[in-house]
Image (tube, rainbow, N blue to C red):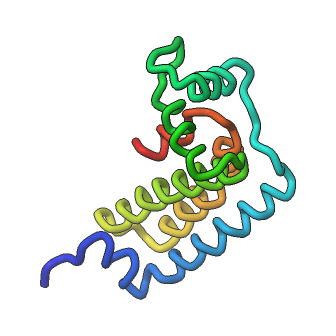
């Protein structure tokens, strides 16, 4: 019997259903609780403002890389909400992290307790919430790596 694809392994394997549902519920609850405590996006002096100025002026070159500024400009076509930006960045980061975790599960078949520990640490790491709350290129480029 051939190995299932990674997508089928994640969503159709009954052993992964608790992980998938825990991830969905955990991400939503963490995000709601975090945004209740920190309702506005955070800004880094210099960096965030340079990205926003570059996006506002539609510059093709600046002292900072312009990729994140282009992303902000594209994102502003859909909404100007800082909360939507934070939510999008957090969801992208969590999707990337969970795809890494499930890829490790798929190829290496770690022990049950190792799975639970790795999954819990990656899913419930508060550093990712704070990172996604910044108007900064770090989250976007970390999630695309």
Q: Quadrant of residue 47?
A: top right
Q: Is residue 41 above or below residue 113?
A: above
Q: Residue furthest right?
A: 37
Q: Measured from the top left, where is residue 34 in percent x and y?
A: 78, 56
As drawn, is 31 to the left or to the right of 64? right
Rendered-image quadrant of the N terminus: bottom left
Q: Residue furthest top?
A: 63
Residue in the picture at 53% in, 12% down: 63
User: Does 141 appear above or below 64?
Assistant: below
Location of residue 53 with respect to 99 vertically, above or below: above
Indicate whether 110 appears above or below 93. below
- Identify which residue is drawn at 54% across, 64% down: 119
Residue at x-position 41% and y-position 56%? 100
Taking depth in this image into account, of 58 and 133 the one nearest to the observer is 58
Determine the residue located farthest toward the bottom in the rendered image.
14
Residues 92 and 119: in front is 92
Question: In the displayed structure, does residue 9 sit left or right of residue 82?
Answer: left
- In the image shown, does 144 or 40 lie closer to the viewer? 40
* Nearer the observer, 28 or 68: 68
x%, y% of residue 18?
Answer: 53, 81
Picture quarter with the C terminus? top left
At a point 60% along the width and 44% down the height, the residue shown is: 76
Residue 105's x, y, as percent?
A: 38, 66
| Numbered circles on residues, count | 0
Q: Where is residue 132 shown, x and y percent of the image?
A: 64, 45
């Amino acid at each position: 019997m051939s190995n299932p694809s990674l997508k089928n392994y994640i969503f159709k394997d009954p052993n992964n259903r608790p992980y998938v549902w825990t991830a969905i519920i955990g991400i939503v609850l963490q995000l709601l609780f975090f945004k209740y405590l920190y309702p506005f996006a955070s800004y880094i002096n210099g960096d965030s403002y340079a990205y926003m100025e570059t996006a506002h002026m539609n510059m093709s070159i600046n002292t900072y890389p312009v990729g994140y500024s282009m992303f902000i400009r594209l994102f502003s076509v859909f909404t100007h909400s800082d909360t939507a930006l934070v939510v999008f960045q957090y969801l992208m980061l969590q999707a990337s992290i969970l795809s890494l975790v499930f890829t490790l599960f798929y190829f290496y078949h770690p022990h049950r307790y190792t799975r639970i520990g790795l999954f819990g640490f990656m899913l419930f790491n508060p550093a990712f919430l704070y990172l996604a709350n910044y108007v900064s290129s770090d989250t976007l480029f970390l999630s695309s790596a």
